[in-house]
Amino acid sequence: MTLQENYKRYEDWKFRSSAYEMALSIINIDKLTVAPPAGAAYRDERAAYLAGELFAIQTDPTILPILAELKTDADPVIRREAELYEREILKIHVIPKEEYVAFEEAMSASYNAWLEAKKNADYAVFEPHLKGMIEWKKKLYGWRNSSLPLYDQMLDDFEPGTTTAFYDRFFSRVKERLVPLIHRVVNAEPAEEAFLYQYCPASLQKQWTTDVLLPLLGFDPSWGYQNETEHPFTSWTCENDCRTTTKYLEHNVTSSIFSTIHEVGHAWYEHNIDPRYDGTILSFGVSSGMHESQSRFCENYLGRSRAFWEAAYPSLRKQFPDQFGSVSLDAFVRAVNASKPSLIRTEADELTYPLHILIRYEIEKGLFSGSIDPADLESVWNEKYREYLGVTPSNAAEGILQDVHWADGSFGYFPTYALGSAFAAQFFRKMNEEMDVDEALRSGNYTSCIAWLKDRVQTYGAFLSADEIMQKATGSPFDPDCYLDYLEEKYSALYHL
Ligand code: ZN
C-alpha cells in the first residue's frame, strides 16, 4: 500500500471509531441520567453489541502495521497518535470479541445491581456482581500476557507509567505527614458547620446553580449541558459537547455546589483541548490523574477559597435567606473547609480525602495480589475505615457501596484522585506566582484562572505526557511535598495550630 492509501485508511479508521465512541458515550450518559430503569436490559444488550462492533473496528488486524509505520511519520502529532493508539490496541486485540461483549453485558448488569443495592443499602445484591467483576478483570488482563504484576497493569491503564512501587512511596509520604496533622486538627476547636445541613429545597438549589453558579464558572450552554445522576460524572464527545452531572441533597446544599464545580472542571479540560485533535486519541485528557488535577483544582483550590465566595456568597445568601441570612462570609468559608473524619469519600474534606483513597488503594492492591479475599471485602472496608479515620459505616450504602467505580470494573482508578489533588497543588503554586488568583476570583473573573490552565495544561490533550506537562507548566518534576505543604499551611491557619 502507498503512503497515501495508508493515511486514507487510517483517517477512515479513526472516523469510524469516533462515531461508535460517540454513540456509546451518549447512550451511557442517557443510562446514567434519565433512561427509565425498566428498559435497562433491552438497552444494555444492544449497547454491548455496539461496543463489540467498536471493538472489531479498533482491533482490525490491518491497522497495527499502519500504526507501526505512522510511528515514524514526519509529523509529531501523527507519531504521538499512532503511539497511543498502538498502546491501547495491544491491550485488547488478543481478547476474543465474544468475551469482550460478554464483559460489557456483565458490566451493565453489575451497574444496575449496584444501583439497586445502594438504594436499599443491601450489599448482598451487589456482592456476586462485584466478585464477578474481579474475576472478569483477572481474565481480561490474563489475555494481555504482560510480565507486569496485575495491579501494576491496572494502575498504568489510568496513569501511564505508574506502578505499585510509585504509589507505595507516594502514599507513605502522604501518611507520614497527614496522619499527625489530622490528629492535631481533630483535637483542635471544631469549626461550626451545622448550618450547612439545613433543609434547602432541591428546586431552589437547581435554580441557583443554573442562574448563578454555572454562568460564574463559564459553563456555556453552547458547548456544555448539566444533568442529574446518582453518582456525578462528566462525559464528552468533542470540544463542543461536554456533559456534566450533579446530585442535589436537600440537607447538604454544598454537596451539589462542589460536585458541580468539580465536574465543570473536567468539562473545561475537554473543552479546552486543541480542537484539531477532535475525533482522535489526543482529544482526551492525558491521564486520569491529570483529569482529576483539573477538576479538583477547580473544586478545592479555587472553589473553596474565600475569594471565590466573596463573589458567590451574596447571591447564595439571597437564594436561602432563612438558612444563611445570619451566617457571615467568614463563617461560611470556614465551614466549607472544615475537616473531620467521615464516611463518604465524595463529601470528604480536602485534608482527610487522601486517606479515603489510601483505603481503596490498599484494598485493590490486596485484592489483586491475593492477600485480600473478595469474600471479606465488606469487613476489610469497615476495618480500614476504623483504623485510618476512626469511623464505622452504619450500613453498606455509606460503606462499600458508596462508589460506582468497582461496579464497572474500574480497579486502579481511585489512586489517581489523590495524585490529581497533588498535581493540582503544584499548578496552584505556579499560578499564584504568575497571576493574582484571589483578585480574579474576587471580581468574578473565574475564567481567567481557567485560561491559565488551558494554556499550561489543557490545550495539549494527550499530545504531551503527564510528566512533560508538569515540567513545562511548573518548571519542575512532580513533587508530592508541594501538596503536603499546601495542606499543612492551610489547615494550620484554619485551626490555629
Ligand atoms: Zn473527577
Image: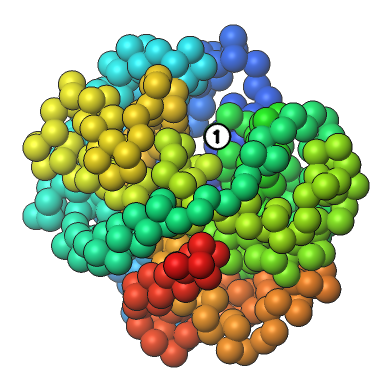
Numbered disc 1: secondary structure? loop
Quarter of the figure that contains the N terminus:
bottom left
Percent x, y of residue 4: 48, 72
Vertical relation: 122 (above or below) 491: above
Residue lying at the far top of the rendered structure: 38
Percent x, y of residue 357: 35, 48
**Which residue occupies the foreground of this view, 6 or 45?**
45
Percent x, y of residue 289: 42, 61
The number of numbered discs placed on residues in the rendered structure image is: 1
Looking at the picture, the colour scheme in use is: rainbow
Residue at 45%, 56% in the rendered image: 188
Please give the residue where the numbered disc 1 appears in the rendered image.
Answer: 231
Q: Amino acid at mark 1?
A: His
Residue 457 in view here: yes
**Which residue occupies the foreground of this view, 241 or 475?**
475
Residue 451 in view here: no
**Which residue occupies the foreground of this view, 45 or 452?**
452
Percent x, y of residue 310: 79, 65
Vertical relation: 488 (above or below) 75: above
Residue at 51%, 54% in the rendered image: 189
Label 1 beta carbon within 8 A of ligand 1: no
Residue at 76%, 79% in the rendered image: 439
Vertical relation: 22 (above or below) 290: above
Label 1: few (<14), some or many (≥20) within 10 Å?
some
Vertical relation: 340 (above or below) 306: above
Q: Is residue 174 left or right of residue 190?
A: left
Quarter of the figure that contains the C terminus:
bottom left
